């Protein structure tokens, strides 16, 4: 008779063998080219990373012009970050030398906007090593070469109307399949300002030519959502399954899979049949093996979908659900055959009646069954808005107050260290590349190495 531990070990080995076959062929795995890293799941193959993020022992610290919640992007010795600029009331794209923290170039790419508890520099940049694209909450979208020379720019508000999200547009762009993907999941009417287009404003998925900025296709993604539930702060996610490549979009009460070549919708799953009106979405979906895993809003359950769906999916398309409190803000991590979920706020609406209602935990889950394996308590409370990062056998997480906690990876994770940066609010994820960690807090960019 197998022990529970033996059964878990066998399931993990089976999953790892299968998932290995599904990993995309990613060059420059030591880089961090987009918000969720080289594998689009929050993990990296980077090694030689520190067990502690003590800011007093930093390799370098660079003061930023202003605030940003965007994750640092790293490619071959350069770090790309965004920033607000109180001096010019602008939005900036910056390139920083990864070895010493010196600013290589800085470009003003838009005008700052006002949004509750947010700023216009929240979307993360994206690069393929040939160009870098910056998107801002103002709708300004620009591509520069690696030397900082402008290639093209356009404004999505001027082209497609008011972005209409209560807390400020925050979706990060995606470079994949030779296209630049952008999603605009929004209300039909603006909270403030002119619509800038014909109302009701449509939820959109866009594919652009990264070399010219021209729209390759525009897909209107219909929704039955009402009021704030129309809004999504999540980002498009690639699903490079052998049977079919899909662009995953979540928000507006559903998750859907699209043909990256045309934008056509393969399938969708509605997760809000009661039409709750306040279910705006923040976390992005993840992929693990042949499953698509998504959060319901407001810290609700995780839903795991089987790949290859068609049309309007029902509950029989679900492989499993996890019904305890999860995350209202952070996107889950897939690392070494396990799913990691960082709970974002003990006051999440879903906390009522949940065994997780007290404290902040890092949950460790079996991707094959959706069952919780273990949990590590990080704090008694507070807000944890960032997404966890996995690399070199460790999980790196940061609180909104800018405390970075390092936890050992695996089913029995333990806290290895805590480090208070004293520079909140901070919502960026930690980037891992070339033996270094890059941490963006309210006013600083910090590089930590052994």
Image (cartoon, rainbow, N blue to C red):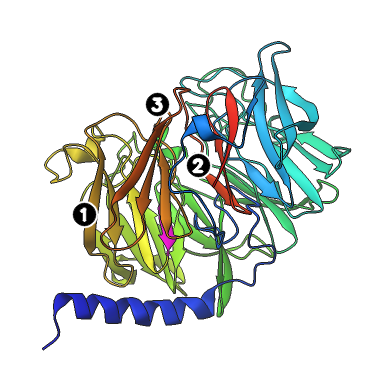
Label annotation for residue 401: 3
Which of the image's four quarters has the N terminus? bottom left
Q: Which residue is mark 2?
A: 429
Determine the residue positioned at 50% across, 44% down. Answer: 234
Cα–Cα span, label 1 and label 3 = 28 Å
The secondary structure that dominates the magenta segment is strand
Q: For residue 334, what is the image quadrant?
A: bottom left
Checking the image for residue 384, the label placed there is none
**Which element is circle 2 on?**
loop
Residue at image x 17%, y 44%?
356
Residues rendered magenta in the picture: 331-335
Q: Earlier in the sequence, mark 2 or mark 3?
A: 3
Q: Is residue 210 above or below residue 309?
A: above
Q: Disc 2 versus disc 3: distance between alpha carbons?
A: 13 Å
Q: Which residue is mark 1?
A: 323
- Outermost top residue: 87
20, above or below 276, in the image: below
Counting from the top left corner in percent of width and height, residue 372 is at 22, 60
Q: Position of residue 205 (x, y in %)?
A: 61, 49
The answer to whether one can see residue 138 in this image is no
Q: Residues within 10 Å of mark 1 (few under 14, many from 20)?
A: some
């Amino acid at each position: 008779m197998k022990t529970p531990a033996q059964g878990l070990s066998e399931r993990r080995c089976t999953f790892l063998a299968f998932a290995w076959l599904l990993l995309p062929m990613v060059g420059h795995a030591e880089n961090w080219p987009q918000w969720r890293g080289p594998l689009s799941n929050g993990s990296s193959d980077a090694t030689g990373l520190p067990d502690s993020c003590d800011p007093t022992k930093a390799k370098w610290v660079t003061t930023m012009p202003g605030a940003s919640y965007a994750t640092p992007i790293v490619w071959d010795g350069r770090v790309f970050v965004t920033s607000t600029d109180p001096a010019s009331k602008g939005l900036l794209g910056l390139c920083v030398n990864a070895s010493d923290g010196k600013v290589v170039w800085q470009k003003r790419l838009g005008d700052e906007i006002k949004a509750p508890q947010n700023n216009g520099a929240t979307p993360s940049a994206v690069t393929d090593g040939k160009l870098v694209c910056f998107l801002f909450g103002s709708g300004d979208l620009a591509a520069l070469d690696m030397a900082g020379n402008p290639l093209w720019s356009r404004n999505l508000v001027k082209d497609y109307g008011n972005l209409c999200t209560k807390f400020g547009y925050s979706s990060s762009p995606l470079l994949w399949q030779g296209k630049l993907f952008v999603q605009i999941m929004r209300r039909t009417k603006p909270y403030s300002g002119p619509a800038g287009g014909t109302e009701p404003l449509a939820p959109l998925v866009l594919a652009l030519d990264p070399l010219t900025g021209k729209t390759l296709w525009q897909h209107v993604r219909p929704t039955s959502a009402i009021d704030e539930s129309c809004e999504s702060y999540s980002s498009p996610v690639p699903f490079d399954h052998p049977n079919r490549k899909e662009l995953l979009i979540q928000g507006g009460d559903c998750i859907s899979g699209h043909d990256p070549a045309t934008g056509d919708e393969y399938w969708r799953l509605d997760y809000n049949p009661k039409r709750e009106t306040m279910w705006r979405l923040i976390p992005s979906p993840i992929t693990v093996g042949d499953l698509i895993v998504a959060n319901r809003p407001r810290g609700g359950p995780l839903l795991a979908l089987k790949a290859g769906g068609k049309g309007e999916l029902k509950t029989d398309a679900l492989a499993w659900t996890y019904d305890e409190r999860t995350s209202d803000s952070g996107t889950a991590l897939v690392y070494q055959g396990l799913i990691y979920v960082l709970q974002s706020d003990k006051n999440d609406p879903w906390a009522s009646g949940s065994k997780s209602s007290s404290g902040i935990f890092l949950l460790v889950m079996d991707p094959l069954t959706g069952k919780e394996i273990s949990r590590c308590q990080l704090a008694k409370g507070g807000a944890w808005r960032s997404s966890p990062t996995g690399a070199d056998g460790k999980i790196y997480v940061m609180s909104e107050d800018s405390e970075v906690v390092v936890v050992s990876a695996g089913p029995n994770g333990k806290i290895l260290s805590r480090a208070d940066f004293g520079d909140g609010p901070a919502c960026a994820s930690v980037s891992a590349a070339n033996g270094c960690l890059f941490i963006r807090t309210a006013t600083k960019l910090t590089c930590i190495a052994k």
